[in-house]
Amino acid sequence: MTKSAKNNSKATARYYAWWVLACLAPLVVFPCVGASESEQAVYAVEYEAMLDPAKGQARVTLALEQATQLLRSASFSMPEDRYLNIRSDSPVVRDGNRVTWRPGTTGGVLSYDYEIGHQRSNGLPDAKITPSWALLKLDQLFPSASTTTAVGARSATRVTLAGPAGWSIETPYTAGQSRTFLVDDPSRRFDQPRGWMLAGDISVRKDTIGAQQLSVASPRGLGLRANDTLAFLRWTLPAMNKLLPGAPRRLLVVNGSDDMWRGGLSGHASLYLHPGRPLISGNRTSTLLHELFHVFSGIRAKNGDGADWIVEGLAEYYSIAMLQRSGGISSYRYEKGLTQLAEWSAGLPCDATDASSGARTAAAVLVMDSLDRELRSKSKGRHSLDTLVQKLVANGATITNSGFKALAGELAGQPVVTLASCPG
């Protein structure tokens, strides 16, 4: 047998091992197909990351196995200040913040060092590693890629995470001592891990609500209010699930240290919440429910369209509405909350923006409340803002100002007065 034939035989054998793993593993939901069809359509990707607190980095390896050249190239978003020492046994080229990798016919290996610590524009970190714990997003550790593949090809992706001896690891995929998991994202042909992860000497509390498994995790000794958070979710999640029934099976909530970003940040099947944030704010909004809406709905603004006021306005509106619907606050308290938001926004109009926050988002909440009332009235109770949100999610969750206004008019049966002066 020639050396080339031996290599192809080894790659095929490794593929079959992946195929069996994908068929048997309970975390993978894509259907298993006949071996001959799979051999032509599936390539195996294995990510490995070792967290290194001494260097403040993670050492990352992406190994590709394929019987034939299914994956031809992958272009990653890798800013130079965070993705260092990129190396490969196949051609790899950096062009600014893009790194393009062209693996060989039967696969290849791409490695790099990832700088974990990161600060937002206000100087507060949203990712951090210390001698005893690390908090970061898998989306950043394993960055997104644009790929060139054979027609119909898709990946079977496995991930292994590791850290210093004794460290536990929590992700949206698996928890504790189980550090290897499979990733299947039906919306992507090149599966990549996403969501928040917390590793190290950590404290974790768990609960189950219906079919959902909840985990609340924090570095040990940093004031985790896990029981409060789980109780809060127990009474509010049913209302959120009724609005958005396609919720993830696992939900992870992570905290960090007090010096980190002082708000909330959503991720795939997970969210970050600063330990100092109240579960219910003085104006009856809830950062936790706001981020939960983002997690469950996946609604996002089309880049450059200025529809972020809609996305953030919906999330903030439902953070109050879910409290009222679940019995957490009375109708009187709900109206008082809207009054406070009106005072804060001081009559600001809805306006196109790619980064809505503060008073502008408060003003958007009032628009959403008014829109809900108008939709209910003009449709004689058949439609509401809930209906609009559910249609947005069903349509793919990426929204524009004009699309939002058109859909609202469609449900009302005529142009809506509430959005007459809004963009679109």
Image (cartoon, grey):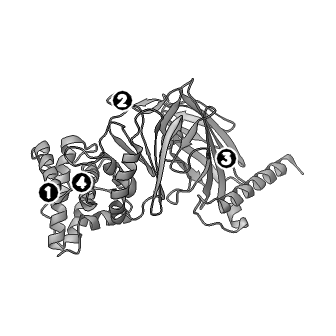
**N-terminal-most mark, 1 or 3:** 3
Identify residue for label 4: 320
Asked whether 255 or 207 is in front, the reply is 207
Q: Tag 4's secondary structure?
A: helix
**Real-space Cα distance between discs 1 and 3?**
58 Å
Quadrant in the rendering for residue 276:
top left
Residue 422 in sight in this render: no
**N-terminal-most mark, 2 or 3:** 3
Q: Residue at x 50, y 27 (%)?
A: 130
Q: Which mark is residue 64?
A: 3
Q: Amino acid at mark 2?
A: Leu
Q: Tag 3's secondary structure?
A: strand
**Real-space Cα distance between discs 2 and 3?**
36 Å
Q: Are marks 2 and 3 in contact (CB under 8 Å)?
A: no
Quadrant in the rendering for residue 166:
top right
Q: Position of residue 297 (x, y in %)?
A: 37, 57
**Real-space Cα distance between discs 1 and 4?**
12 Å
**N-terminal-most mark, 2 or 4:** 2
Mark 1 is surrounded, within 10 Å at the Cα level, by few (under 14), some (14 to 19) or many (20 or more) other residues, namely few
